[in-house]
Every structure is written in C-alpha cells, then in structure tokens.
Amino acid sequence: METDRSELTVKELGYDQMISINAIESTAQELMRKAAIEIPDDYLAGLRIAAAAEDGDLSSFVLETMLENYEAAKEDSRAMCGDTGCPRWYVKMGNEARIDGGPVALEAALRRATATATSSVPLRPNRVHPLWRTDHDNNVGIGAPEIEYGFEPGGDWIDLVTVHKGGLFGTDYRMLFPSDGIPGVKRFFLDCLVAFGKRGLACQPAIIGIGLGGSKDTCMVLGKRAACLRVVGDRNPDPKIAELEDELRDLGNNIGMGAMGFVGKSMVIDCNIEVGYCHTGGMQMSVHAFCLSSRRAVARIYGNGKTVYRNNPEWFTDYQRRETVEWVI
C-alpha cells in the first residue's frame, strides 16, 4: 500500500536539516553586492538589442554610455548607479524548509545583511523617516527593508531575492471599470509612460510591470512583482495576456520617447503582466517601471547548506498563479 506523502514526517521525507542563519546572512550580503554591481544578463541582452535599434542621437548616446558604465562598475566593483535605490527582499520557501531560529531570526539576518552591505558595498543610505527625516545610515528602519514571502509545495530550500528598486517615480494606479476593457488598459499604460518619461524620471529604458485585478493593495504588489521578478523575454502562460505584453511593449517604444526621456524609441525593454481575481464591478490596474539599473540578485539555499546563485527569480510558478481551492500537481 502506497503511503500518502502528506502523512509523512519531515524526518521521514529526508528534510530534517536546518538552514543556518549564518548561511542566510552571508548569502544575503553577497546578493546585496551582486544586485548593486552586476547588471542581470537578461536586462543587459535586452538593452543591447535596444541600443542596436535606437536611431535617436541623444538616446543612442545614453544607451551606449549605460553599457560602458555597466562594464566599468563590474571591473571596479562599484555600484552601477549613484542612487542605489531602496533595498527590499523577496523570500520564497519550500514547504519543508526549516530555518535555524525561525522567521524572526530570518528577518533579523536580512536586516543585518542590508545594514552591513550599505557600508561595505557601499550603498547610498536612502531610507529616512517620512516626517522627521531620521536616517540610521544603513537603509534599515521602520518597515525597511521590505520583506515579502511566497511558498511552494515540496522542498527544503529557501530562495532569497533582493531588489534595489527606486522609491520615487515610475509607479501609478487607476481604478478601471469592466467596460474600459483592453482599450482602457492601453490608455492608462500610455498615460503612465508619458508621465514617467518626462525628464527621464523613471530612468528608462525600463522593464514595465502591470498588475491587473485584485484589491488595490494586491494590484500594486502584482505590478511591482511583475516588473522586478520576471526576466526579459519571459511571457505569461495565458496566450492572450502574453500577446498583450508584446503589444504594450511595442506600443511603448513607438511614442517618440527613448532613453531618459530624449527623442527615440527605447522606452520599454519589456512588459510583464500579472493578474488577480477582483471585484466584479472593477478592474484595478497598476503600472511600475523597473529602471535602467534593474538591480536584482537571486540565490537558493538548500537544507544541506548548498547555495546556488542564479539570474531568474522564478517567482511566478504555476502554484503562485493557481486558481483552484486545492493544489493538485
């Protein structure tokens, strides 16, 4: 008689090893360094394609200078941009992962790694109190860095993803209605790109993430994750949404605006859409620009202590996009 795996203990499944806090903290520090200095391969490839196609004089100059800057940053082991953004963390755990000290110890390790990296990389200490402008000089404070979580069935691993996203411009939200349909989505998308692109406030060319549906807070989360946690060239598994992603990317590159707001056609490196079920009377939409630095780094730590660095966050799995009550493989 076959045993139901759900009834087996963690030890019987072979997942009885603790992931050490020291491994989490040291890996997190290295991820902070990588995100600040090493441009992700997927964005770099997309930028090279944009540079080859760009025919605007100033936009071409900006793109070529950006490519040179990335190489210089890597050679000198320095941050690729003077504004190193607002570090944040995305943590995903396999269902059988066990962390030494539990989630409180995990969050403390990520806060320590953020503070240490701010000094050692170094990063600009951008985080301040909104009213009193208190600055601890380490990018740590109330609600900072943000730490968001996801879970996956099976596995004794933990994924750490750090993203150093700008915290000023390049984000907007609008409550659309079902009658607005796809034309309404396109209209708000273009409104945002024009607003973002003025004077280069969104530091384009950018990866544009769009959240559709959910409640307002969910919609904002979906859009930001779409921008930051999918690689260039990845497509939504829904073929109609994937088609819309391509259409919006091309539309964004034909508004006469290029790199940093100059005349050109390199506004958007890619466009990613994620959706969530919403109230029947509305269609929430958020738009997020992940700027030309596209600072992110990813690693998986296994229960046996092995650590693997990779480029793709692999956040949006079938499990994350599930529609059913129960998860059936």
Image (cartoon, rainbow, N blue to C red):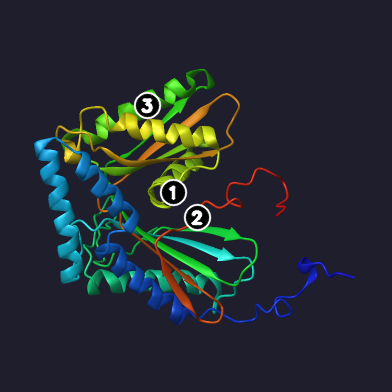
Answer with mark 1 or mark 3, whichever residue precedes in sequence. 3
Answer with mark 2 or mark 1, whichever residue precedes in sequence. 1
**Quadrant of the drawing holding the N terminus:** bottom right
State the image quarter where residue 17 is shown.
bottom right
Q: Secondary structure at mark 2?
A: loop
Q: CA distance from mark 2 to mark 3?
A: 26 Å
Which one is in front, 179 or 302? 302
Q: Residues within 10 Å of mark 1 (few under 14, many from 20)?
A: many
Viewer-nearest of labels 2 and 1? 2
Q: Position of residue 5 (x, y in %)?
A: 77, 68
The residue pinned by badge 2 equals 315
The residue pinned by badge 3 equals 188
Q: Secondary structure at mark 3?
A: helix
Q: Position of residue 177 (x, y in %)?
A: 50, 22
Q: Residues within 10 Å of mark 2 (few under 14, many from 20)?
A: many
Q: Position of residue 315 (x, y in %)?
A: 50, 55
Answer with mark 2 or mark 3, whichever residue precedes in sequence. 3
> Do the residues bearing badges 2 and 1 touch, measured as CB atoms within 8 Å?
yes
The tag on residue 225 is: 1
* Image-based side of 164 in relation to 101, left or right: left
